[in-house]
Image: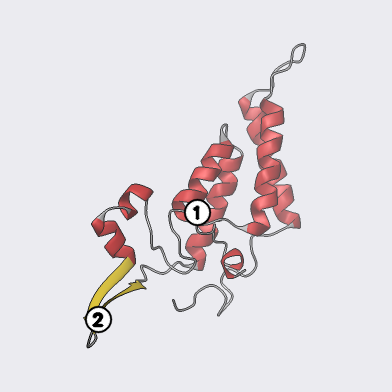
């Protein structure tokens, strides 16, 4: 629930932490340097056994402004041709997915697909007209539903690891 309130995309994203920017691409995380940038491995010895302690290291903290800018970028990507893959890629690469604007993004993606669909006997709509219509729809939708109101609220966004 905390991840959802913080507009985090969950553990399937490249950036797996809801409070900081720890992570990277799958290839990077599989390297020694990538792993060590996320986890700190400490060896210590007790009387009869050796133990390994692995703990999470925090990276640069996420900020409300950066999160809001990323959500706005995802909205912008949703109105472009091929928006579905662009939004999916942006979510995976940043770790940010806002549940309050997800319905707006999905609506814009579906509307864009239907406007761009070529049907026999119908005149094709120009990309400029499609962009104008989608931009207007996005503005109308955002008037009725804002970006996550919890972003920037003290105590909600950032917490200790």
* Relative image position of residue 151 (x, y in whole percent): 58, 68
Q: Which of marks 1 and 2 is in front?
A: 2
| Residue at image mark 2 | 49
Residue plotted at (60% across, 58% down): 98
98 sits to left or right of 55: right
- Mark 2 Cα shell of 10 Å, populated few (<14), some (14-19), many (≥20): few
Which secondary structure, mark 2? loop
User: How was the colour assigned to the protein in this rendering?
Assistant: secondary structure
Location of residue 2 (image quadrant) = bottom right
> Looking at the image, is 64 positioned above or below residue 14?
below
* Screen quadrant of the C terminus: bottom left
Label 1 sits on residue: 12
Q: Which residue is rendered at x = 48% and y = 54% of the image? A: 13
Q: Residues within 10 Å of mark 1 (few under 14, many from 20)?
A: few
Quadrant hosting residue 99 = bottom right
- Mark pair 1, 2: CA separation: 35 Å
Question: Considering only vertical position in the picture, is 95 above or below 115?
Answer: below
Is 93 situated left or right of 46 in this image? right
Q: Is residue 107 left or right of residue 70?
A: right
x, y (%) of residue 83?
57, 37
Q: Which residue is drawn at 76% across and 15% down?
A: 122
Quarter of the figure that contains the N terminus: bottom right
Q: Is residue 159 left or right of residue 147?
A: left
* Relative image position of residue 118 (x, y in whole percent): 69, 19
Residue drawn at point x = 69 percent, y = 23 percent:
117
Position of 89 relative to 57 (above/below): above
**In the rendered image, the vertical position of residue 28 relative to residue 37, given as above or below:** above
Disc with the residue nearer the chain's start (1 vs 2):
1
The circle drawn on residue 58 is: none
Residue 141 in view (yes/no): yes
Disc 1 is placed on an element classified as loop
The mark total stands at 2
């Amino acid at each position: 629930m905390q991840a959802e309130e913080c507009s985090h995309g969950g553990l399937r994203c490249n950036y797996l932490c809801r409070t900081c920017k720890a992570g990277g691409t799958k290839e990077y995380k599989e390297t020694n340097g990538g792993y060590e940038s996320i986890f700190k491995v400490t060896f210590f010895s007790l009387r009869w056994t050796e133990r390994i302690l692995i703990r999470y290291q925090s990276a640069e903290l996420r900020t409300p402004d950066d999160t809001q800018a990323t959500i706005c970028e995802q909205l912008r990507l949703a109105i472009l041709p091929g928006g579905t893959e662009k939004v999916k890629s942006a979510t995976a690469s940043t770790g940010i997915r806002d549940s309050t604007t997800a319905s707006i993004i999905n609506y814009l993606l579906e509307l864009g697909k239907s406007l761009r669909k070529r049907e026999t006997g119908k005149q094709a709509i120009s990309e400029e007209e499609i962009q104008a219509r989608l931009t207007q729809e996005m503005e109308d939708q955002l008037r009725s539903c804002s970006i996550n109101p919890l972003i920037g609220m003290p105590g909600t966004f950032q917490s200790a690891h």
